[in-house]
Image (cartoon, grey):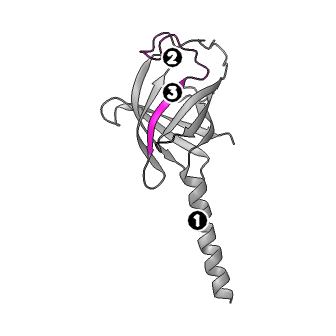
Amino acid sequence: MGQNKFLFALLFATFSGGVFAEDISGTWKSIDDKTGSSKAIIEIRKESNGTFSGKITKVTPRPGYTPKETCVHCPAPYTNQPILGLDVITGLKSGKDNEYSGGRILDPLTGKIYAMKAKLSANGKRLQLRGYIGVSALGRSQTWIREN
């Protein structure tokens, strides 16, 4: 009987760990890769087609920086849209080993759109994002921290 309890506990731990670690839905604090300070709060949600999208729900003021209200230099359909509520991540697809790819990320400060990929930490509390043009080696990385 003891062996059955052990197997059940092992299966439960494996299953429950996978459920929490694989889903990036939730609220994330974006951390500036240059300054290390918080930039914004992003809500990532799973769409009906299975991809992930993320919108800005709060902009974090920082010393020496006044947040923009609208996406001035952004291409259509983002041009002059309010920063709050703006979908900055679109089309991100889940892969194996807590990796995500195929998405796009908008930098609302520059108006540039980058290809993106991401990797969720094993404990599900950190999301390492990589935005790039062309090849991944030519890009920037950020680490986001789960808020909830």
Query: Which callout, 2 or 1, points at the residue further toward the start of the chain?
Result: 1
Q: Amino acid at mark 3?
A: Val
Q: Position of residue 34 (x, y in %)?
A: 53, 26
Magenta region includes residue 75: yes
Q: Please, what is the three-letter code of the amino acid marked with disc 2?
A: Leu
Residue 93, image quadrant: top left
Q: Is 31 part of what is drawn in magenta?
A: no
Is residue 39 among the parts visible in the rendering?
no
Q: Nearer the viewer, residue 64 or 92?
A: 92
Disc 3 or 1, which lies upstream in sequence? 1
Residue sitting at x 48%, y 17%: 78
Q: Along the horizontal axis of the image, is 116 left or right of 25?
A: left
What's drawn in magenta, residue-wise? Answer: 72-93
Residue 148 horizontal side relative to residue 106, left or right: right
Residue 109: numbered disc: 2
- Of discs 3 and 2, which sits in the foreground? 3
The quarter in which the C terminus is drawn is top right
Q: Judge left or right: residue 30 versus residue 98.
A: right
Disc sitting over residue 88 in the figure:
3
- Residue at image mark 1: 15
- Regarding residue 64, the answer to whether it shows in the image is yes
> What residue is at 61 percent from the left and 74 percent from the top?
10
Count of labels in the image: 3
